Amino acid sequence: MIRFVARRIATSAIAVFGVVTIIFVLARLVGDPVALMMQPGMTRADVAALRHGLGVDEPIPQQYFHFVIGALHGDFGISPWQSRPAFGLVMDRLPATLQLTVAALGFATVFGIALGTMAAARPGSWIVRLCDAISMTGQAMPNFWLALMLVLLLSTTLRWLPPAGYGHIENLIMPTLSLGLFAMSRLARLVQSELEAALRQDYVRTARAKGLSEPVVLLRHALANVAIPLVTVLAVDFGLLMGGAVVTESVFAWPGVGRLLIQAIGQRDFPILQAGAFVIATIVVMTSLIADLAYAVLDPKIRHA
Amino acid sequence: MPEIVADNALSAPLPRRVSTLPWGRIWRGIRLSLNPVYIAAAFLTVLVGAAIFAPWIAPFDPLQGDVLSNLAPPGLDDSAGPPHLLGTDMLGRDVLSGIIFGARISLIVGLSSVIGAGLIGSALGILCGYFRGMLDEVLMRLVDIQLAFPFILLAIFIMYVLGQGLGNVVTVLVIASWPIYARIARAEAMRLREAEFVEAARALGAGHTRILLRHIAPNATQPLIVIATSAVPQMIIFEAALSFLGIGLPPSEISWGSLLAAGRDYLEQAWWIATFPGLAIMATVLSVNVLGNRLKQRLDPRSRHL
């Protein structure tokens, strides 16, 4: 168990390091930030000073060395455009992104499990067909299009919700729905099929034979066993939602990390790109690490392996 | 099970009735043709046909706008030339023609990126699973790295490096999606290399190349095909997302994503610009998924209940 955990932590750290390195290289391939910052009337010496100030006059291996040393100390450099530490800028935006992804994941979890369970409880009924229809269409809609359609319906036509913005609960509804529907649909389908398989198991027959009521059998016995694989799926979904949030943030003018990064790519703001990549990769990796550990703790077969 | 009871009730002999038309057979025919699998297959056939014959089918040149008829609503109004069935955009370009031409891009991107990523990922995965060792260690760390960073963000970064363009979009999607195939192919190869028929081949003196190509690869294809089928719609959506963010295809190439993005600023005045391209994406994804599910059921009897 300790070996498993140690190995898992080591590979996670390598993954984060790898992501940051790849983004370091890709950022430098995007272009030279100085070219965007030059102003008319600057002398050659001014440009050299600017270059030196950004640290981009060094050879790339040396830049990388300085970057790694700084990053290990939590220092990702200063954004040349915003003149503030890049790590702080990313962390300022993180709550908005987390608010959106956690809300979407919560929506997906609650409605996905509810829908899937109802469908599995009544095989062959209209609920199964409803669950099928929702999960098929939900998985077929691109989240940015769904976002636009929600704006069209709820803001432009019905005028119930503000089309964009941040800070109030009514601002959160459409971003959550458009980001979470895909995950919700997939989860509903998964819960339904897993539950149907679980309900055919011997322990369910035993539970029914004991005279337990159907809700108890369904929730306490079958669903509890399905919950374990769900943890892994939810962790993977969280990573996907972090990615999907980039697009959702751009539709709803949501002040999250994704929009900051897209802006930073355009401005070739290396410190923000590197800090952002580090933060996102760390969150994604930590989530899957926690899920794996939870899985190991929940499932005795793995715990004792 | 209740469905079986219902089916029996339907197929029970109907009371004799004087009728000029065989209603029973017609009704059964309608029910049969409403089968989602047939509808999906029909839609995809029409879509592929439209993509291939786009220049002959599309009522207008999708890039040539007519400013006099800009933001025309969908309808059959033919007072000013042929009607714009699905309306026009802010430059007076016909939305329906855009969707027909956009189908080409979406299908090309979806199919070629899946084929590219599938071949590369499967080949690497099979090699890793068969030989294990250093190569396997390195490649699996690479997969971990990619899974630690959201696909779409990575794709955005690479698009900025490569620049807009059809080939570059496909390249980005291949780079971003090969790990899925590598993981599955690796697992299959690890399972198969211990199989008895592989051992038998080895005992008969077969070399690694022969074992990999004749014994392992053919037996590993089924799960890979299932994954690839469900990846096609995902790639279509990712292309649309990149074009929606303005970094996928240049404006000279029409795609469903760029059409949709163009409608974003006109939601109030012209709902149809953003709505119809999205419906096209949705119908395509839905159809591929319906057929993909059927394929999965055919290939794997255990997943009949999924």
Image (cartoon, rainbow, N blue to C red):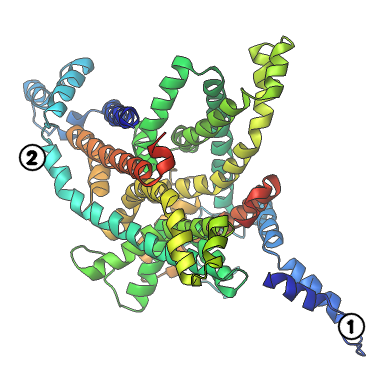
Q: Nearer the viewer, residue B109 or A11?
A: A11
Residue in view at x 41 percent, y 20 percent: B138
**SS at mark 2 in the image:** loop
Q: Nearer the viewer, residue B248 or B147?
A: B147
Tell me: B296 left or right of B145.
Answer: right
Which corner quadrant of the image does residue A61 belong to? top left
The single residue placed furthest to the bottom in the displayed view is: B18
Could you tell me which residue is drawn at 38 percent across and 31 percent down?
B144
Q: Position of residue A13 (x, y in %)?
A: 27, 29
Compared with B242, B76 (above or below) is below
Against B158, residue A222 (above or below) is below
Identify residue type, mark 2: Arg
Q: Which residue is mark 2?
A: A84
Q: Do badges 1 and 2 share one subunit?
A: no
Q: Residues within 10 Å of mark 2 (few under 14, many from 20)?
A: few
The quadrant the C terminus of chain B occupies is bottom right
